[in-house]
Image (tube, rainbow, N blue to C red):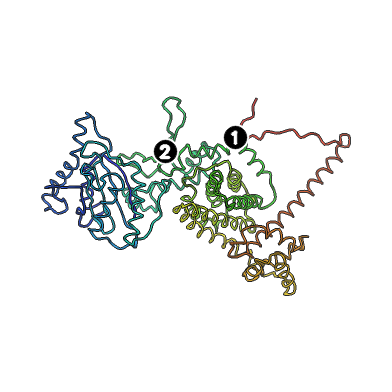
Amino acid sequence: MVPDVSTGDRSRGLLSYLFGPGRRNEHTDPHIVAAFAMPGINDPGRVPIDQHHGALSELADYLDQPVKLREQRLGKKVPQHVWHCPVRTAPGDRYLTDEEWAEVARRIVHSTGIAEHGDDAACRWIAVRHAEDHIHIMATSVREDGRRPRNKGDGRRAQAECRRIETELGLRRLKPGDATAPKTPSGPEVAKAERQGRKDTARVWLREHAYAAAAAARDEDEFFAVLTSLGIKVRPRLGPVTGEITGYSLATADDTDAKGEPIFYSGSALAPDLSLNRLRERFGLADGKAAGQATALHTSRTDAGASWRQADGELRAAYMLVTGGTAVDEADAKVQAQAAAFAELLHNTAVSAPRQLRAEIQAAAIAFNRANRSAIRADHRAADALRQAGRTLLTSSTGRDGDFVAAALTSAVFLLIALSEWHAQRGHAQQAAAAQQSLVHLRAAQQHAARPALAQLAARAPSPQAQDRLAAAVRATIPDHAHRILADPAWPALSTALAQAESAGNPPRRALAVLSEQRELDTADRPAEVLVWRLRTATAERVSQRARSAATRSARSTHLTTNKETPAIPAITPVTVVTSHQRPSR
């Protein structure tokens, strides 16, 4: 059961909508199911058609009487005096009777402070039903005694009451809200999108692209530049005194009002964490010198898959932090930061991953947008490394190696599971549900990435005698997980990976001992597959390190040979890395 509290200033206009045919002729049998008190006032839904407009005006005047009296006494208009709360049952729920809806309405106005039980001086209100699955509660928010109601937090209180009503009426239990959800598109927005043949409303489309742009950008200038490059109109909000940018609004080219002017949505109207202040909290960690150095370090890498190995390592580090098991507020702030950085990494992975994986990863990123924030304020500094790893994926031209991609996605799956459990343990029901929805898509991408490489490894499995020897090593080294590992369909692929590691100078027992220390094996559905990617990336890293060491020795030898007169190694002078966002001091 979903309530949605809003306010306005036109009683007659709202009544015309409630008792009218609807924007798409969807209203059927509009009528009042409950009300504060209506002595001698007709129900506009139960009068002859020729009396309909008169009944609407009469009802509007009746509801507005306390408002007019307050305006006369104070000598000024009462702002936003129309209180409106549609209440809808969830899809699949049974249809409630008029009597049940009447009780729902009375409980909602009581719980929100609009009209408490037994309060004869409360606000005037009515509840209109014009569809099987919902009602609209309308009130004028001036009490009979001329005071305004004490209805602060009415949306949250309505949500809490709906959770209790669902239990009592045997309806589907929805997730409780926590004031962090983005604003739901309005009925007119949905209707416009349908008329234009668009899948999403302008608000939702802008929200998704703003998240993707924020994930890719290092500061607000880049953020606005990326949005502009996508054809999105950006309108900064300037402070009246300083002239500095204090906020922003976005609009699409084809979403206009009746006058043909673009309809702008502020960042906070798209989502709470897309306000400029919230974005600056993240950008403040990645701009200037630190960001320039991170980019320069990355562009200097030449070995294949370096960016994916970096992402894999940071994802595993984040997993260890999230599963640390402490409930200290400071630790929670750090975990919340990991969730926000992971959301950015998902968006950047959707751009950087092999083409066949992008649709599923993008779906995972969009679903996780709801899970990347909660009522816990994030300590973004704690997740700077994970955020930088995500941005590094965008600048890599050598990050498409299949093993490294599959390993990073495997680590991402484990981190996503851990974040889902973390949210659930803290009662973040909506975030936990969003994380589970994201997990479906991310698992699909990970399995798609893993399938070809696993098949190739399994096709090159060692002899039965060699597999028996490797299985004995598994039993001796990882006895608690040996049965599941050997029963995993990925065991033939793991046996190949172990044999390859042995050929590269890494004995199976030593390799397994290191890998078994990682906590993911306790919850992995496919423990052998997890070990495959851990072992493959570890082996590749060892080979890469050897190559780098050899290159260093060669360079040093060349230097000593060509500089015999000055064999001493000079002191290293710090160098400032200059990027488009940083200029050297003069």
> Label 1 sits on what residue type?
Gly
Q: Position of residue 175 (x, y in %)?
A: 41, 54
Of all residues, the one furthest to the right in this rendering is 565
Of all residues, the one furthest to the bottom in this rendering is 464
Q: Position of residue 420 (x, y in %)?
A: 51, 55
Which mark is first along the chain, 2 or 1? 2
Q: Position of residue 3 (x, y in %)?
A: 33, 51
Q: Report which quarter residue 252 is drawn in.
A: top left
- Residue in view at x 20 percent, y 38 percent: 66
Q: CA distance from mark 1 to mark 2?
A: 25 Å
Judged from the image, the secondary structure of the residue bearing numbered disc 1 is helix
Judged from the image, the secondary structure of the residue bearing numbered disc 2 is strand
188 lies above or below 77: below
- Residue in view at x 38 percent, y 45 percent: 254
Of all residues, the one furthest to the front in this rendering is 118
> Label 2 sits on what residue type?
Ser
Q: Position of residue 276 (x, y in %)?
A: 47, 37
| Label drawn at residue 288 | 1
Q: Is residue 243 left or right of residue 150?
A: right
Between 77 and 327, the residue placed more toward the observer is 327
Say few, some or many: other residues with alpha carbon within 10 Å of mark 1 (under 14 / 14 to 19 / 20 or more).
Answer: some
27 lies above or below 456: above
- Residue in view at x 36 percent, y 40 percent: 262
Q: Which quarter of the rendered picture does the C terminus lie within?
A: top right
Residue that numbered label 2 is attached to: 249
- Residue in view at x 65 percent, y 44 percent: 298
Q: Which quarter of the rendered picture does the N terminus lie within?
A: bottom left
